[in-house]
Image (cartoon, helix red, strand yellow):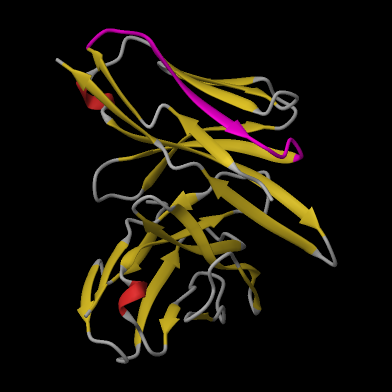
């Protein structure tokens, strides 16, 4: 059974700092890994999707890496801004081929990021 | 605008009163799913659908029903809601079952008293 862990659970940084959020997963047989952002009381916004064959993806100030062999992904945020304050979730897409495919998206519990002006 | 919509956004109801939360997507996605989000437990999948008339259980299906009669709609039905179903519910969709981004709706906050 896939388990996804995110450390730390909460992080507070001053504006302008570069930071790294960590995500680890127990089953390396993933199709891809997706990072989301969730603002309080709101839905999830997709940030980056890394396919299992890729090592990293970039979008603006965000860079996500994937190391399947070690079961780790990181989300790097450059030059953080107060508007980056939110909960960041990673989710691993795993398929279990037991009597027909069973697709599963397993989420971590998130890292609550606060960027202070 | 490409989006997943849910209705209602907020609902307070009483134990045992049947309710339906609607979900609709306008992106011609094949795959749709329902999640609930609870403090300390994170997001857990309730049901998913790979295409029209194809649905299957997720991690926490007890007390819920779904149907997929049209590609764009995937309603979540609570036949007899109980207080332990008080939660924040999200509908999501993606083009296919795997390899594609998941798009989430804005959420439905349900309180069962």
Vertical comparison of A80 with B25: above or below: above
| Magenta range | A15-29
Vertical comparison of A49 with B110: above or below: above
Q: Nearer the viewer, residue B1 or A58?
A: A58
Instruction: Tell me the residue at 62%/62% (across/down).
Output: B30
Vertical comparison of A54 with A96: above or below: above
Instruction: Tell me the residue at 67%/20% (across/down).
Output: A55
- Residue A12 at x, y percent in the picture: 26, 20
- Residue B36 at x, y percent in the picture: 42, 62
- Residue A51 at x, y percent in the picture: 68, 33
Q: Nearer the viewer, residue A9 or A114?
A: A9
- Quick check: can you spot residue A55? yes
Q: Report the side of A48 relative to B18 (left or right).
A: right
- Quick check: can you spot residue B96? no
Instruction: Tell me the residue at 50%/69% (across/down).
Output: B72
Q: Quadrant of the C terminus of chain B?
A: bottom left
Name the quadrant containing residue A15: top left
Q: Report the side of A30 relative to A19 (left or right).
A: right
Instruction: Tell me the residue at 56%/78% (across/down).
Output: B68
Q: Report the side of B30 relative to B113 (left or right).
A: right
The stretch drawn in magenta includes residue A22: yes
- Residue B96 at x, y percent in the picture: 66, 55
């Amino acid at each position: 059974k896939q388990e996804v862990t995110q450390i730390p659970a909460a992080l507070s940084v001053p504006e302008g700092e570069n930071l790294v959020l960590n995500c680890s997963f127990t089953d390396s047989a993933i199709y891809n890994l997706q990072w989301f952002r969730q603002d309080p009381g709101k839905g999830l916004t997709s940030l980056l999707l890394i396919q299992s064959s890729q090592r990293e993806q970039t979008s603006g100030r965000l860079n996500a890496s994937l190391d399947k062999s070690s079961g780790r992904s990181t989300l790097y945020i450059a030059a953080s801004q107060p508007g980056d304050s939110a909960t960041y979730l990673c989710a691993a897409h795993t398929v279990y081929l037991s009597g027909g495919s069973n697709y599963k998206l397993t989420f971590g519990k998130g890292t609550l990021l606060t960027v202070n002006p | 605008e490409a989006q997943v919509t849910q209705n209602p956004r907020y609902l307070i109801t009483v134990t045992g009163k049947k309710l339906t939360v609607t979900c609709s997507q306008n992106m011609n996605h094949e795959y749709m799913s329902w999640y609930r989000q609870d403090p300390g437990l994170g997001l857990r999948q309730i049901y998913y659908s790979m295409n029209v008339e194809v649905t299957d259980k997720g991690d926490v299906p007890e007390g819920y029903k779904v149907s997929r009669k049209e590609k764009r709609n995937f309603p979540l039905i609570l036949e007899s809601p109980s207080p332990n179903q008080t939660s924040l519910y999200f509908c999501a969709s993606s083009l296919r079952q795997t390899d594609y981004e998941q798009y989430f709706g804005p959420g439905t906050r349900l309180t069962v008293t």
